[in-house]
């Protein structure tokens, strides 16, 4: 029995089949196959033993969205199907189980700046009752959060494509009345309102076989003989995956707000997970699930404006990439919502970061039934983890230099301080 199909309606207790799916032999005729004798046709079908198709998780259903028209919901459905498939995955359930375990069940670490912090431990596997429990907690988020598309204006400042807003009351009484656990609260999730229009546009263009996308390349001053042709179909898939990741990232934050208590104002917002320097739960989750944080491979060179960067964050024109240890160089920002624990894992500037491009095939495979029906069943998490293509890997060093990526021209004339790291080009 597929856990995702348990308790299909609000009224039915989890772990039981609603009465409308009649168990037992399909008719009074004698001598049914023992499986049909027990489950009946309707339950077997509903549980995915006869038909299978991706389905939308209850936390993403239409009723969860504020002010969203039916036709706009249709546009985001492929992203919701991907996000749903990840939420339903058995491995993902172990993460939510660990996050909702409560501070008593987590380990603690002490940090000079942050004091005592909680570290969650993720079990390798979950017993069936624990899976149902974790699923029920995720599902309960239907009562604790809402989704909304909003103008990116305030998001674009921090280069994000979505954000989670806890429902605070006042500064001193910052928690809404406890929903499940004291000192937790409900939330609203905002996603960039650029996703809908962009998805619609690329869908139309993909339908029409569009294969240009040179406006961006012209804006970046790329000469015609070095421009490449980009398929709308590919941009559509990357935009869909980006939306799915944004949805999952913000959902994890909302889940943390609902289950991880913050008893006093300066208490860390979220617990840590093993191997992560930051407690940024959205990032931890992305690394856990995908094996890295998936980002748009942006072209953003002078004199392009910030708007070009924001646009590519929504619609990755030039592919996707990820790196090893996203938080390797993070430093603690006392004003920020997320904290870096330096005692636990100190910052390591001596080592470069490895960057990998993501094959487009990976991206488009996430949109297929075969991925979730066949490959995940056979290979588990390995089926959808990002491939680390070593031949294509490149390195990024942390050091002062001009430009967003520190690859500015002037760096070549600088006097090297460290003969290895300072003279090596970033693409070593
Ligand atoms: Zn986040």
Image (cartoon, rainbow, N blue to C red):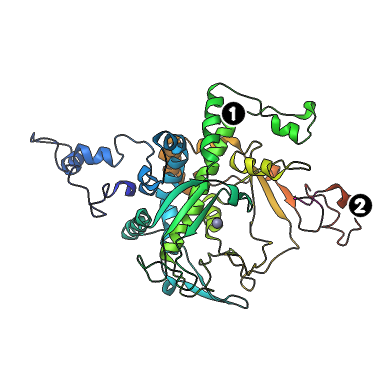
First to last magenta residue range: 401-407
- 413 relative to 256, above or below: above
Asked whether 405 falls inside the magenta stretch, the response is: yes
Residue at position x 30%, y 38% in the image: 49
Q: Residues within 10 Å of mark 2 (few under 14, many from 20)?
A: few
Q: Residues within 10 Å of mark 1 (few under 14, many from 20)?
A: many
- 167 relative to 377, above or below: below
In the rendering, which numbered label is found on residue 232? 1
Residue at position x 49%, y 75% in the image: 264
User: Is 55 on the left-hand or right-hand side of 354?
Assistant: left
Give 59 or 63, whichever is nearer the viewer: 63
Residue 257, quarter of picture = bottom left
- 184 relative to 9, above or below: below
Q: Name, please, the residue furthest toward the front.
A: 170
Is the residue marked 2 within 8 Å of ligand 1, measured from its CB?
A: no
Give 379 or 79, whichever is nearer the viewer: 79
The residue where tag 2 is placed is 413
């Amino acid at each position: 029995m597929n856990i995702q199909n348990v308790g299909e309606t609000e009224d039915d207790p989890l772990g039981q089949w609603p009465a409308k799916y009649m168990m037992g032999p399909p008719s009074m005729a004698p001598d049914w196959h023992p499986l049909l004798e027990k489950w009946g046709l309707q339950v077997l079908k509903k549980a995915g033993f006869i038909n299978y198709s991706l389905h939308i998780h209850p936390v993403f259903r239409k009723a969860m969205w504020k002010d969203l028209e039916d036709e706009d919901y249709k546009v985001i459905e492929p992203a919701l199907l991907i996000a749903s498939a990840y939420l339903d995955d058995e491995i993902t359930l172990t993460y939510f189980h660990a996050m909702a375990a409560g501070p008593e069940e987590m380990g603690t670490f002490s940090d000079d700046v942050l004091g005592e912090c909680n570290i969650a431990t993720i079990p390798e596997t979950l017993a069936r009752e624990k899976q149902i429990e974790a699923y029920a907690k995720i599902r309960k988020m239907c009562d604790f959060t809402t989704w909304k598309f909003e103008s990116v204006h305030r998001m674009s400042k921090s280069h994000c494509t979505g954000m989670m807003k806890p429902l605070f009351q006042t500064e001193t009484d910052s928690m809404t009345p406890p929903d499940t656990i004291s000192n937790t609260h409900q939330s609203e999730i905002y996603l960039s309102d650029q996703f809908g229009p962009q998805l619609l546009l690329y869908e139309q263009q993909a339908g029409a076989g569009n294969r240009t996308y040179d406006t961006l390349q012209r804006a970046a001053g790329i000469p015609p003989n070095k421009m490449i042709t980009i398929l709308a179909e590919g941009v559509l898939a990357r935009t869909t995956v980006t939306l799915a990741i944004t949805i999952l990232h913000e959902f994890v934050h909302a889940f943390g707000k609902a289950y991880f208590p913050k008893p006093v104002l300066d208490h860390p917002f979220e617990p840590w997970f093993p191997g992560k320097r930051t407690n940024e739960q959205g990032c931890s989750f992305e690394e856990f699930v995908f094996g890295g944080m998936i980002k748009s491979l942006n072209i953003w060179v002078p004199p392009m404006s910030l708007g070009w960067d924001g646009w590519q964050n929504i619609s990755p024109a030039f592919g996707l990439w990820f790196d090893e240890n996203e938080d390797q160089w993070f430093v603690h920002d006392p004003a920020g919502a997320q904290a870096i624990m330096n005692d636990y894992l100190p910052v390591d500037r001596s080592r470069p970061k490895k960057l990998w491009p993501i094959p487009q095939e990976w991206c488009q495979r996430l949109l297929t039934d075969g991925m979730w029906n066949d490959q995940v069943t056979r290979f588990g998490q390995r089926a959808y983890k990002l491939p680390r293509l070593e031949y294509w890997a490149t390195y990024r060093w942390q050091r002062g230099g001009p430009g967003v990526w520190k690859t500015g021209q002037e760096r070549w004339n600088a006097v090297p301080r460290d003969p290895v790291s300072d003279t090596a080009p970033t693409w070593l």
